[in-house]
Amino acid sequence: MQATLIDVLPRHRIDTNAVAGWLRPWLPSNFDGQLQIRQFQGGQSNPTYHLATNVGAWVLRKKPPGVLLPSAHAIEREYRVMQALAGSAVPVPQMLGLCEDAGVIGTPFFVMQHVPGRLLGARVVDEGTAAERSALYDDLARVLAALHNVDVARIGLADFGRPANFLARQVARWSAQWEASRTEPLPAMEALRAWLPQHLPPDDEATLVHGDYRLGNVLVDPTQPKIAAVLDWELATLGHPLADLGYCCLMYHLPGAEGGCSDLDLAAHAIPTQAEFIRCYCHCAGRAVPQRIDVFVVFSMFRLAAILAGVYKRALDGNASDARALGQRERCVAVAEAAWALAQRTG
């Protein structure tokens, strides 16, 4: 399906004239200054807008209004990583420009090319033929492998993160985010905070990682089962590649109501098993199939629950970028409890 465009939410209105004025030096000289701004529905983090002009369509992404959690909504990092990946085997939109001056529209923002494509908006493919679904999962694995094989020094991202003790620092970071976002007690989250530091594998490698890699964060080519662009890079850094892989495997541990496939007949829906998806990724990445992946999945579910808690808190505070954000409380609880159940089975 195509991404849904809506009238800009009252909380996220921006000055059309200010945007048009900022765009003018970046666009062709025949830009007439007229601009129609609409908002993409569905993003829970950084408000994202469609900009229609007489010289083409563009996308503006900005930080949300209000008080923000530390290190969250890093649109400057999103811009940098996508700009660096231009021309690589990882498909990304072309960057137009970054504005770090909050005085223009209230927060920093960047503008990028509008890439035509389908936004599936979920972790599970529910359209197309069986062959097309299978091919799309293969391409999802291929692009993730391509990302992890990027030479970060060659594209200027050698300083994009601190890979040492990546997993331990991630657990600490998302524990802090949970503390900052918590609106009520959630025993499963507290149990996970204690369990994870005792079960983390060694940080024996580091690559560029996306941090939120899944079907819902890619644009699919309009006519073929192929990824046209990878979006939503605000969590990108240098870290353990299996953290990305584990996060991508969340769909196998969440029910259909949560966008997963744990309660589906995988073969009937042309969905590869977790083992098949991992083997495809490893083949494309040129690496051995990992001995253990569950701990990375548990960590990813813990982090997802912390993110959902933050979305819910922003909704309570009136700052969420999607009108449906109040519903994230139930999702947070469900994901946290599923993560703790998996942790207990993992041992």
Image (cartoon, helix red, strand yellow):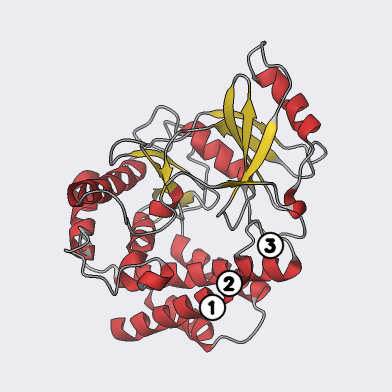
Quick one: label 2, few (<14), some, or many (20+) residues within 10 Å?
few
Residue 89: x %, y % from top left: 34, 33
Q: Is residue 311 left or right of residue 130?
A: right
- Name the residue beneath numbered marker 2: 327
Query: The residue tagged with tag 3: helix, strand or loop?
Result: loop
Q: Residue at x 50, y 49 (%)?
A: 236
Query: At numbered mark 1, what does the secondary structure look like: helix, strand or loop?
Result: helix
Which residue does the image show at 54% across and 78% down from the upper left? Answer: 330
- Residue 304 lies, in percent from the top left, at 49, 67
User: Mark 3 or 1 closer to N-term?
Assistant: 3
Q: Amino acid at mark 1?
A: Glu
> Which class describes the residues within 10 Å of circle 3: few (<14), some (14-19), or many (20+)?
few
User: Does the CB distance between marks 3 and 1 fall below 8 Å?
Assistant: no
Disc 3 designates what residue? Answer: 69
Distance between the alpha carbons at the discs numbered 3 and 1: 21 Å
- The reply to whether residue 165 is visible in this rendering is no
Dots 1, 2 in contact, CB < 8 A: yes
Quarter placement of the C terminus: bottom left
Q: Amino acid at mark 2?
A: Gly
Q: Nearer the viewer, residue 115 or 10?
A: 10
Q: Position of residue 320 (x, y in %)?
A: 67, 60
Front: mark 3 or 2: 2
Q: Which residue is mark 1?
A: 330
Is 128 left or right of 43, judged from the image as shown? left
